Amino acid sequence: MSSANTLIALIGRPNVGKSTLFNRLTRRRDALVDPTPGVTRDRHYAQIEWEGHAFTLVDTGGIEGDDDAMGSHIREQAMLAVEEADIIFFLMDGREGVLPGDVEIAAILRRSQKTVFYIVNKIDSAAQEETLLSPFWELGAEQLWPLSADHGHGFDRLMSALPPHLNQEAEHDPLPENTLRVAFLGRPNVGKSSLINAIIGETRMLVSDVPGTTRDAVDTRLSYGQYSYLLIDTAGIRRKGKTRDKLEKFSVLKTLRAIGRCDIALVLLDAAEGITDQDAKVISYTQEQGRALMVLINKWDLLENDRKRQLQLLDEVRMALRFIPFAPVLKVSAHTGIGIKRLFPEMGKVQRQFHQRFPTAALNRLLTEAVAQHEPPFHRGRRLKFYYTSQLATAPPRFVVVTNDPKGIHFSYQRYLINCFREGLGLDRVPVQLFFRERSGRRGKK
């Protein structure tokens, strides 16, 4: 499978169909979706699985400005998209023809070393291809991709050409085998860099009281005992209303990529401020990508003499995490060293569960027992049946259950089965994903 870190950015002028293509990709049944309650899905990015290949899709929004000329702001935004993405879907409007903004974006793309798909959108048929495509050849593209993101014309042709490029984007990983990748996430100025410095025992990173100091994800290798770690420091993610600065927006994309390449996401909270809506948003990003999660309440020393506030804060955190109760919560202080020694043993437990595999026979016994204890309901006059289960993958543990009617399984019963798998397999510290498929040969099987 291709690396989920491969980032595909949709760029182009406003109203050329970027969001429409984004929605077509994310709503296809090819993409596996885990409907975990409480996980907010950001409409501007999504994890996509397409024919065995995984990638992150980002809708960068319209490149704002006059359609007839690109100002410096527009040019910088396009350059940042080119710099950050692995693959670029450059969308243009086939009905409007080539506009000066398209010409300048194309010039930027030609100078890049990235894979670019020149997509001419709003072409609904083969007949329209003949009449609408010709002006776009002046952009110098080796190939044009006619598409109707709205109606689907050309979509399968475009996507069938993507997998070879995803394979080429897999990066060589020089890290020692079994290196544990840990990303430190949270709002600006919550203490991510300071905590890493406290862990490694030396100031090898820039630490500042100015929010937003860390623009990129910064990696630090660490050996501790017999184990190797990669500590990934990331830029703080602000509230959407505070991400108008274009550099800040792209620092969010860098953070999302950091989540995609880590095993465990450590989300830091500020003990002085408590858990905020934005903290919950950062946590949702980690679950969107199926990462193991640990929540660290940093600056715990500030509450050292306030037992009432300590208990209140822990209750607030537990309430915010009620839909993901598996996530360990640790109290730490980058300033005094509180709780840091507990991090490594806890990360080890999480890592073992995150990568654990189980024999199929044991999984089927577990499924049989779960169904016997709580029979599934009827759906459209027939009893739901579960035939067998197997493990699809690790990191996170993912299981598939073969059934007679995947669409008839209510979310509450899916949650019941997930809890049975979690308890029966001892997966109390990591996310567990459970998918349903119809038995081969049944009518309607895709």
Image (spheres, rainbow, N blue to C red):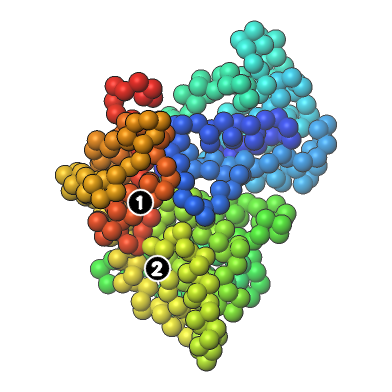
One can see residue 52 in this view? no
Name of the residue lying farthest toward the front: 381
Identify the image quadrant of the C terminus: top left
In front of the other: label 2 or label 1?
A: 1
At x 16%, y 44%, the residue is 361
At x 50%, y 70%, the residue is 317
2 or 1: tag closer to the N-terminus: 2
Viewer-nearest residue: 231 or 142: 231
The crowding category of the residue bearing disc 1, from other C-alpha atoms within 10 Å (few below 14, some 14 to 19, many at least 20), is some
At x 24%, y 38%, the residue is 388
Residue 275 higher or lower than 373, as above or below: below
The residues bearing labels 2 and 1 have C-alpha atoms spaced at a distance of: 21 Å
Viewer-nearest residue: 2 or 23: 23
Identify the image quadrant of the N terminus: top left
Amino acid on which the number 1 mark rests in the picture: Tyr
Judge from the rendering whether residue 254 lies leftward or rightward of residue 445; answer left or right.
right
Q: Are marks 2 and 1 in contact (CB under 8 Å)?
A: no
**Residue 238 image point, x, y percent:** 64, 61
Judge from the rendering whether residue 362 lies leftward or rightward of residue 162; answer left or right.
left
Viewer-nearest residue: 37 or 5: 37
Residue 156 higher or lower than 115, as above or below: above
Look at mark 1 in the image and give the residue it sits on: 416
At x 55%, y 83%, the residue is 309
Amino acid on which the number 2 mark rests in the picture: Pro
The crowding category of the residue bearing disc 2, from other C-alpha atoms within 10 Å (few below 14, some 14 to 19, many at least 20), is some
**Residue 172 image point, x, y percent:** 38, 46
Label number found at residue 328: 2
**Residue 158 image point, x, y percent:** 53, 23
One can see residue 45 in this view? yes
Residue 149 higher or lower than 335, as above or below: above
Judge from the rendering whether residue 105 lies leftward or rightward of residue 418; answer left or right.
right
